[in-house]
Image (cartoon, rainbow, N blue to C red):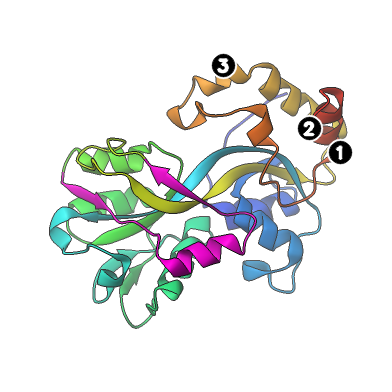
Amino acid sequence: YNCVGRPALGSVFNIRAVQRTLLDFGVAQSDRNFQAFRGQGDWQGKQMDELRSVFSMHPETVLLVTRADAGINSVSDLKGKTVNIGNPGSGQRGNAEDVLRIYGIDKDKDIKAQGLQQQEASRALVDKKIDAFFYTVGNPSAAIEEPANSTQLRIIPINDAAIYGFVDERPYYVMTTIPGGTYKGVEEDIETYAVTATVVTNASASDEMVYDLVKTVFDNLDELKGTHAAFKILEPKSMLKGLTAPLHAGAEKYYKERGWK
């Protein structure tokens, strides 16, 4: 196989590209997979019925990052501030909009919402062009590590009672904690919620190709775990959870051979 990794605009873009077979595989958040397969959210009335799950990877936490001098100590303090909520077509934009809605903040009236891609947003925070940004990502992330080396950051907990209720009602979310010390200058534990990064494909993808990809990943899992800090926690049992679209037949064949449900 000739494998090429292509940077893309996020979960919504990747799911649509997989549905149209422009990509053989894509990485997307578990919540977006759930919505796409059922015709909800960005896919209201347009069910992505050819979407298929391959395996899950690491949890991606919903983060609210600000400068320590921005005067933001809670989500509610975002009112009147310039906040990056993510570029259109990204999963993080949907997460940001959910958080703002839950906390009673109108993104069109109460904040100056920006739609920057994350690399731009990280620079803009340091340059004081924005006061905060939302980012849904596995930890540690260079997009947070790099600005932390240039300015004092604060990561805001996203964990009030309404968030707990929101998470409890949705099978694709979990509450999680980012340990203190993960990022420079952020010494306290930060509680927030998370989705799972999942690999998806199209139902029409060949069973042999999908089987071979899955076998390669799981037969070499220790090597994969060493390629990025976010992958260190990967275990087969957890990689079969959070699959909110049906399994592809090629992936299912491998899992049955291994005796995994």
Distance from Cα at disc 1 to Cα at disc 2: 8 Å
Distance from Cα at disc 2 to Cα at disc 3: 20 Å
Q: Residues within 10 Å of mark 2 (few under 14, many from 20)?
A: many
Q: Is residue 228 left or right of residue 124?
A: right
Identity of the residue drawn at 34% across and 56% down: 157
- Please tell me which residue lies in front, 181 or 205: 181
Residue 177 vs 258, above or below: the answer is below
Residue 243 point in image, percent of width and height: 70, 46
Segment tinted magenta in the rendering: 151-178
* Tag 1 secondary structure: helix
**Residue at label 2?**
210
* Tag 2 secondary structure: helix
Residue 88 visible in the snapshot: no
Residue 153 visible in the snapshot: yes
Q: Amino acid at mark 2?
A: Val
Identity of the residue drawn at 67% across and 55% down: 33
- Please tell me which residue lies in front, 93 or 95: 95
Residue 192 point in image, percent of width and height: 42, 53
Q: Quadrant of residue 166?
A: bottom right
Q: Amino acid at mark 3?
A: Glu
